[in-house]
Image (cartoon, rainbow, N blue to C red):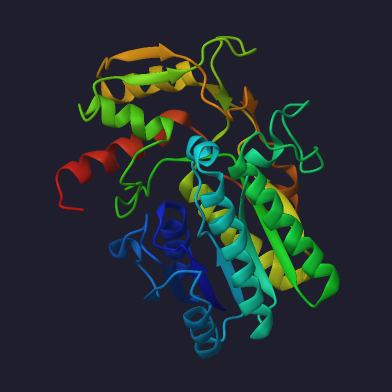
Amino acid sequence: MKIVVTGGAGYIGSHVVKALGKAGHDLLVYDNLSTGHSWAVLSGELVRGDLADKILLNDVMGNFRPDAVIHFAAFIQVEESVREPLKYYRNNVSNTLNLLEVMVHNGVRNIIYSSTAAVYGTPEKIPVTETAPLEPLNPYGASKVMGEKIMAHLSEAADFRYVALRYFNVAGADHEGELGQAYREATHLITRALKTAHGEFDRLSIFGTDYPTPDGTCIRDYIHVEDLAQAHVLALHYLEKTGHSEVMNCGYGHGYSVREVVEAAKKVTGIDFPVEETCRRAGDSPALIADSGKLRSLTGWAPRHDDLEFIIRTAWEWEQKLRGSEI
């Protein structure tokens, strides 16, 4: 298939691009490189462009004539979204509208949409299924709910199909050492922990120790980025084969608390780095764990890296590579 990948130079997007390239797809990556990197695009052509630029986007779509789009380009930091909600609605909603309008104009009818477990807010039941109420606690989650609703309405009004993949906590790095997280500002727990172990931060902060969980810290379902990448390849095949729009959770079905992740990071690195306990962050849910039964049954997805220490080890190896390079 011919596929346009928006945000394909970023952390998750680049892993998916690598997996799609290995599967033999013809790729064009469209990325403004605000958080992504050109070196991370290991397959296909890279066009530097912003989704706000509808003229360039339309030219790219019209010339490449893709069969499908995979849409990663979004801002994703929960805390930042609380501070700067307009930034998130402008990029995650308005720019998604631009993309969908250009797709419709050019007759592109299939999209895989990067969504999030943040759409659920604080679910009543754990693990959470796709039928749970959508009650996001922050503008980031709300912006993704809006994206899903727009696509649902479009699919009812036109010949248009989508799969929205709701990610839980994505972590780890390419086991071959070619890709990993390289954000200019590290916000993810595992990455922050490993950078603290390296001495890049004085200490690691634990935000909130009074949640209604066994040890008082937030619990999350951590999924290795390569397993998530494979979920995208399979979701694309599902959409191509069935033509049915769907929403699917992407997670392992069990979680780890912040304290458990910190202890695992100390074990993998062999470094007892400093940790401080502080107050809760705005917009955080106490626990988010996926019921991924739909993804498994509809696509045949079978994760290979459901192991917290493996996830952290691949991320640690990537961090060590980063320190020894000019990336």
Residue at 75 percent of width and 73 percent of height: 160
Question: Which residue is at the far right?
Answer: 156
Residue at 35 percent of width and 66 percent of height: 41
**In the image, is 264 to the left or to the right of 68?**
left
Please indicate, yes or no, whether residue 261 appears anywhere in the rendered image.
yes
Viewer-nearest residue: 79 or 8: 79
Viewer-nearest residue: 266 or 156: 156
Viewer-nearest residue: 197 or 147: 147
**In the image, is 161 to the left or to the right of 84?**
right
Q: Is residue 175 above or below residue 53?
A: above
Return the x and y of residue 168 as percentages of the image width and height: 59, 39
Q: Is residue 204 above or below residue 163?
A: above
Residue at 77 percent of width and 71 percent of height: 243
Total marks in image:
0
Q: Is residue 142 above or below residue 205?
A: below
Instruction: Determine the image quadrant of residue 152.
Output: bottom right
Return the x and y of residue 228 as percentages of the image width and height: 54, 50
**In the image, is 248 to the left or to the right of 167?**
right
Please indicate, yes or no, whether residue 291 appears anywhere in the rendered image.
no
Residue at 15 percent of width and 52 percent of height: 326
Quarter of the rendering occupied by the N terminus: bottom right
Return the x and y of residue 87 as percentages of the image width and height: 51, 51
